[in-house]
Amino acid sequence: MLPTSSLRALQVGVPRRITGRRFASHGPPQFNEPSGWLFGEKPPAPGQKRVKEEWENIWYVGMFGSMAMAAVLLFYKPDTSIQTWALREAKERMEARGEKYKYEPSS
């Protein structure tokens, strides 16, 4: 490890303008600065309605339509669990042997 005196000499030797440069970032940040407005839109004047952009209705139909379709498909999804298969298989085997698969109390 270098002695502290040589480290101080290295610090003094570096000019201040070089330490503040960003060599790999290629200039100032490339993003929209925050404006404080929701989604960067200024609210319309009182009494005026917001004008929708042309893609918004397509997005709403696609987003909520796909959610509705997913809900319907999940509701009517076939039951493929191992428990359902095992119960069905057990019932078929018991019927094949002539046994009852439902419990009936003998009182």
Image (cartoon, helix red, strand yellow):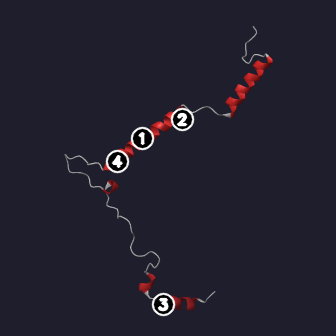
- What residue type is disc 4 on? Glu
Q: CA distance from mark 3 to mark 1?
A: 62 Å
Q: Label 3 is placed on what type of residue?
A: Val
- SS label for mark 4: helix
Mark 4 vs mark 3: give the one in front. Answer: 4
Q: Earlier in the sequence, mark 2 or mark 4?
A: 4
Residue 12, above or below 61: below
Cα distance, mark 2 to mark 4?
27 Å
x 34%, y 62%: residue: 34
- Front tag of 2 and 3: 2
Nearer the observer, 98 or 37: 98
The amino acid on which the numbered mark 2 sits, given as a three-letter code, is Leu
Task: Tell me where residue 41 appears, x and y as whole percent.
Answer: 29, 55
> Camera-side residue: 71 or 23?
71
Location of mark 3 (residue): 12
Disc on the earlier residue, 4 or 3: 3
- Count the marks: 4
Identify the residue position indicated by label 2 in the image. Answer: 74
Front disc: 3 or 1:
1
Q: Is residue 25 left or right of residue 48?
A: right
In the rendered structure, find residue 56 and report the number of the disc placed on it: 4
In this view, the residue farthest toward the right is 97
User: Disc 4 versus disc 1: distance between alpha carbons?
Assistant: 12 Å
Query: Mark 1 is on which residue type?
Result: Phe
Percent coordinates x, y for residue 46 in the rendering? 20, 48
Give the CA distance from mark 4 to mark 3: 57 Å
- Residue 78 occupies quadrant: top right
- Disc number placed over residue 64 in the picture, else none: 1
